[in-house]
Image: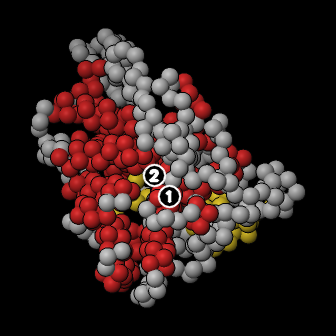
Amino acid sequence: MMNYITSYTERRRLFWSALAVAVVLPLAGCSDILDVTDPDIVTPPSLESDIGLQTLRNGALGEFTIGYSGGGGQVDAIVMLGGLMTDEWMHSGTFPTRFRVETRNIELDNGTLQGMFRRLQRARVSLESIAAKLEEVAGGAADDRIGEMYYYAGMTYIAFAENYCNGVPFSVQPETGDTEFGAPETGSQILDRAAARFTSALGAAGVSSTIANAARVGLGRVELNRGNFSAAAAAVTSVPDDFVLMSFHSSNSAGQRNSVFEFNRNAGRWSLGDLKGINGLNFRTADDPRITSALCPGCAFDKSEQVPGTDALTDNWLYFNYTSRDDPVPLATGIEARLIEAEALLASNPAGWLAELNDLRADWSSLASVVRGDDSGTLPALAMPVGATAQEDLHFRERAFWLFSTGHRLGDLRRLIRQYGRSAESVFPTGTYWKPGANYGVDVNLPVTVDEENNPSFTGCIDRNA
């Protein structure tokens, strides 16, 4: 079996090589250096060579990272924008399109969301087409890149299902012929797509143990979104506690950077949330070692253009878990697997549920490196809350702190509405916006933006329900 799951440094180098470097192919009959027989940078036959396939693989992984957790400047990813719509992040910059996302008043021509939607779709298409090409070339032989491509494709569908409205279309462009336009699909149909890709990853010849465990977490996440708690727990039972798969980043260009560090620590345009909109959690003031932060006195931005008549400067609170543009972001972890198992026990076995949560907390010293928290801190054991509602509140709070800014929070708030009978106004930031002069709206997901109207099979979201 060919093993392409290498060290962090090597994987990061490979991720971005295809985005900036042309492949130089050997020339036939090169006795004369001027004897150039083919001017193409990459010819179709070369893409079936191992170096060609590796180049395609690297490019697809780079596309995924840019769409999922990369960003800088005007390049936003789902990890940040989903968190901005919830209580994780507050907009301390000046972009009106981000302001609209945070206040849950999103217009269909939102340019920030248009770019992100296209990047996620581009990543999906790249990953699926390269998985098919790898399977074709392998001819049944083991190649761990096949399972890898299917896993990351599954994660693009998770991003669409958890963050977007019912009605996301998925078009394809065949190697020959016209574009095959996709019709709007419900969240349930999108989860079916995600499950199929994770299952393909697990069944791929030569799949690595890393990708197999990540795919198991992905399947657990699918079933959690469906409300099939026992199936979710069964999917992740073999995932080790210390398992982690990272989304890798680079300071090479804006899209490749760790977007959490870039927008918060470097640019000062996003501030760590705290008690946002009545319902928001106290991420800053909880004194929890899973989230480290401090006020940056010299990082305030002028927000007066967005909300006329407000104070000109907005405080910026910095999140210290990431320290550079190159820091990786967790994609799938054993922590998430244990949280899935805990939720499966929540209704039927509260004692077992609490024991799962406390086992994680007791293991903080070894798990701190996964979330890059303060390993000198402690997480005391939790006491049993009184009543089902309080228990649910504690469970989702634990998920919020363990999985902070990893692309889970918007999906979790929507699940509280769908599966636990909460109202949107009781889980999302609501009421008066944290800067005077505006109010939170009613959106509970991201819409498919206006440029998709070029698709003749698409007429808009099926609905905007949770």
Residue under numbered circle 1: 414
Q: Is residue 178 above or below residue 23?
A: above
Q: Is residue 71 above or below residue 460?
A: below
Name the kind of residue labelled 1 in the image.
Arg
Closest to the camera, between mark 2 and mark 1, is 1
Q: Is residue 364 above or below residue 317?
A: below
Kindly state the secondary structure of the residue where label 2 is placed.
helix
Name the kind of residue labelled 2 in the image.
Glu
**Residue drawn at x 43%, y 30% as measured from the top left:** 183
Q: Is 212 situated left or right of 128 in this image?
A: left
Residue 368, position in %: x, y? Answer: 41, 75
Q: Is residue 91 above or below residue 194?
A: below
**Residue drawn at x 84%, y 60% as measured from the top left:** 310
Tag count? 2
Instruction: Give the class, few, some or many, for how many residues have Cα within 10 Å of label 2's Cα (few <14, many ≥20).
Output: many
Residue 207, position in %: x, y? Answer: 19, 49
What is the C-alpha distance between the residues marked 2 and 1? 8 Å
Q: Is residue 262 visible?
A: no
Q: Earlier in the sequence, mark 2 or mark 1?
A: 2
Q: Tell me the number on the disc at residue 162.
A: 2
The answer to the question of whether label 2 and label 1 lie on touching residues, with beta carbons closer than 8 A, is yes
Q: Quadrant of residue 61?
A: top left
**Residue drawn at x 42%, y 29% as measured from the top left:** 182
Residue 266, position in %: x, y? Answer: 62, 58
Q: Nearer the viewer, residue 38 or 225?
A: 225
**Residue drawn at x 85%, y 53% as measured from the top left:** 308
Q: Nearer the viewer, residue 452 or 376?
A: 452
